[in-house]
Amino acid sequence: MTALRKLFSFNGGIKPEPHKAASTVEPIAVAPLPARLVVPLWQSTGAAALPLVQAGDRVLKGQRIGAADGGLSVAVHAPTSGTVLQIGPQPMAHPSGLLAPAIVLAADGEERWADLEPVNVAGTPPDALRDLLRDAGIVGLGGAVFPSHQKLRPGPHGTRTLIINGAECEPFITCDDMLMRERAAGILRGAALMKHILQAREIVIGIEDNKPEALAAMQAAAGSEAEVVAVPTRYPAGGAKQLIRVLTGIEVPHGRRSTDYGVQCFNVGTAFAVHQALDLGRPLISRVVTIAGNVARPRNYDVLIGTAMREVVALAGPQPDTDRYIMGGPMMGLPMPDFDAPVVKATNAILASSPALFPPAPPEQPCIRCGDCARACPADLQPLELYWFSRARNFGKAQEYHLFDCIECGCCAYVCPAHIPLVDYYRYAKSEVWAHEREKEAADAARQRFEFRNFRQEREESEKAAKLAARNAAAAAAARASADKPLPTGEPADAAPSSTEDKKKALIAAALARAQAQPAAAPPRNTDNLSADTQAEIAAIETRRQQVSPPAGDDAGETSATSAAAPGTADKKALIAAAMARAQAQQAAAPPRNTDKLSPATQAEIAAIEARRQQAASLPPAPPEPPK
Amino acid sequence: MMYSPFLRPAPGVRGVMLTVLLALLPGIATYAWQFGAGILVNLLLASCAAMAAEAAMLRLRGRAAGLALGDLSAVVTAWLVALSLPPLVPWWLTVLAVLIAIVAAKHLYGGLGQNPFNPAMAAYCAMMVAYPALMSQWPAPGQLDFSAQLDLILGGARNIDAISSATALDALRTGLRAPGATVDALRQTPPFGFLGGSGWEWVGAAYLLGGLALLARRVITWHMPLAFLLTLAAVSGTAWLIQPAQFAPPWFHIVSGGALLAAFFIITDPVSGATTPRGKLIFGAGIALVAWLIRSFGAYPEGLAFAVLLLNICVPLIDMKTQPPVFGHRGGESP
């Protein structure tokens, strides 16, 4: 279905050389099975997976070897059958070169699949489908690797549009292009499944207009199920927020979910992975990776997650002056610490880099405030202001100027005539802000601990002091008591009795004081939470009791209502009151009698019987009727 | 290690400055054609002085000289200084002005990118205040041959009367002080041409050409020149419509003095100007308004330089108050 959709545009953006033709000549090839695979447990936004296997275990292809840890986490799977060599720190596909826990597999070469269970989507509730996707390890394959099941929750006002992102705006990268050309039906099927889970009303597929083959293939596969829209080629049109803007006109601000605005956006690769997971039961164990840059034969490969980058790039024939790999494209890609980092779910491309292809950045010159960066910024930021604030370590001001709305697309640094590595400044500022927040959180926790410790110590001190004071007061009281007795020796009743007898007295007095204090602090009685009728009953009992043991003296009766009158009348009145209370409570709490819904005639009959009975009851008791 | 983006195709500061210099060439050529080649001597003098001052200051500040000298920003400043001064000022005045621009207005504030004031305009104002007589000696078109010009520039002899034909703005200003004088009557006198000052109209047109080239190459944006020229036309046009005898028409203001040079080459200095789109409009309009006020009511015939400096002071405030809305924060509906 060709689009007659009204397209919107975003400000800024750039038009770099695409460099896409070379890697789209040959179809996607399957990369050969490596002997050793390194499957990092942490491959997606959120928490790392928890390992389910141990060193020495035999695993099957597609077997879950790491379980999702919490809501924002997904499972990882064995990319092939083999043996777990070890679970331990391995180099990450990250510029830091840090090690992270990973499961190292030795492939047995048999590629034996675990039992795969296709899902009956129609008969499975959405929550269960989301759990299935989590356990199939589905994450956003556009590069952000956000757990997809978390994005598949309908928004508060429902989801109108499901956007499938086939824009692929970064230079060199063609994995989505080739996937759309070759596996359009699978992508559409995955999109339909996601539409079902999201309860979305329409599917719109956005593809940059420099991919006519992909557009044609997707249009042919889409039929009337989805709208395939050619969007103008301008980097970063493939940014989720930019594509949502272009296709719907909606701007999703930083920190808001797009489902709040009734849209959700997934990469075409993710859609295909969802189709594989639900229709075939196949978890995410491989992905299409573009190998390009300084290589002889740029091409796309279907690569098992965990394959060493060096082995994949070797297929494309890297040139001898290759000095480094870049994971991703030249605008937002990450320089890899070495050639042996594993292919992970985020690896959409590996670019072999050389000083000739990507020359070192020219020396940084002073900012002349030309504003080219502001004109190029797709987030409508003022990058030059952010640069000045970041440089001056004025991070509060940088946040005020929307530092965190920066998507790090690199347009500003691309156009900067002074060759300032602007994005580096923003990454630095962001990391400083995060570090500051972590420090603040840690400091807050420490302060709370400290304050509680002070509080606890003070409480203990005051309790001790109170005990001591009570003891002293009791001792003083005891001393006074003893002083009241006429002492034969005429000894003055001093506050600190010294004799052993006095000490004993003081202790007894203290014990008494404690005993008196206890009832005041006693927990609520179990009679406090009773129902109205039970309480009424108890009140009646209490009244009876008081009647049995009348108030001790006349002086006590002045204020008490029950004992205001003479004891005899008070008894009767109390009994009557109690009986009435009981009766009222019973009536209130009694279930409706089966006589309530009878016809007037029957009720009249019953009333007559009742009257007769009461009459009979007033007579001397009749002999019991014999059982029939 | 280099991080993304790995593509950095931008031409560099040198590329930007070179484009500005090239865009000035039509104006310079017309200038030399109308008023003699003396201006070329001034430009050369100014360029040499600027490069020497730049190198010395970089050395004093302990900065690597190579890249900073090569960025040509000092040459742009030098050319703007030379084109702003009267073409026949003595050589030392040109050198002094350039020194003030490079040393005081630029490097004492921290060098390229840090100066709050437009260096060329700061220098112009300093000279205007210090040497008002020399700064008001403008030649008429074709008045002096090249050797006479060289004599005036390099030699000490100054026959003031030979060159003191006032500019159109100056003539208008002094002429209007006489009782009964009208703008129309004054514009029949020699300093005036078709629209503005005799000869300057052509130079202005050439500046306009160069400015359009800068716009086409996206070195500058349309905001500042358009806001400046429109505001100048609006305020001068309003006054002229109300009192045509006392106020010059808008086209006269636009083609006279340094208006067209300023519109495209001076107020558009990115370092000392506003950076936001709305800020640029305010900045350009503000300069035009202040310049017209000074021209019409002030103590100087040409108020552009002072107007630029005044608005330079306002830039931080203008930028702060005109930050454009960020993507997703346009104050629209939020569910």
Image (cartoon, coloured by chain):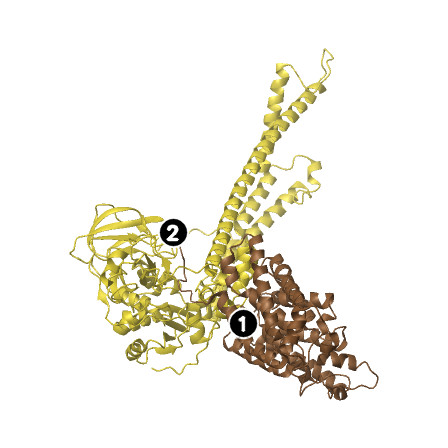
Chain colours: A yellow, B brown
Q: Mark number for residue B21? A: 1
Toward the top, the furthest residue is A489
Depth check: A268 or A358 in front?
A358
Specify whether B275 is left or right of B157: left
> The C terminus of chain A lies in which quarter of the figure?
bottom left
Specify whether B307 is left or right of A322: right
The residue depicted at 63 percent of the width and 37 percent of the height is: A550
Name the spot of residue B210 as percent of width and height, x first.
55, 78
Specify whether A135 is left or right of B169: left
Kindly identify the amino acid type of the residue bearing the numbered disc 2: Ser
User: Which structural element holds mark 2?
Assistant: loop
Q: Quadrant of residue A143 in the image?
A: bottom left
Residue A604 in view here: no
Toward the left, the furthest residue is A110
Report the chain holding disc 1: B
Kindly identify the amino acid type of the residue bearing the numbered disc 1: Leu
Up-down: is B245 above or below A124?
below
> The N terminus of chain A lies in which quarter of the figure?
bottom left
Depth check: B49 or B14 in front?
B49
Name the spot of residue A198 as percent of width and height, x first.
38, 69
Q: Mark number for residue A96? A: 2
Q: Are marks 1 and 2 on the same chain?
A: no
Q: Quadrant of residue B94 in the image?
A: bottom right
Other residues around mark 1 within 10 Å, as few (<14) / some (14–19) / many (≥20)? some
User: Which structural element holds mark 1?
Assistant: helix
The residue depicted at 31 percent of the width and 67 percent of the height is: A269
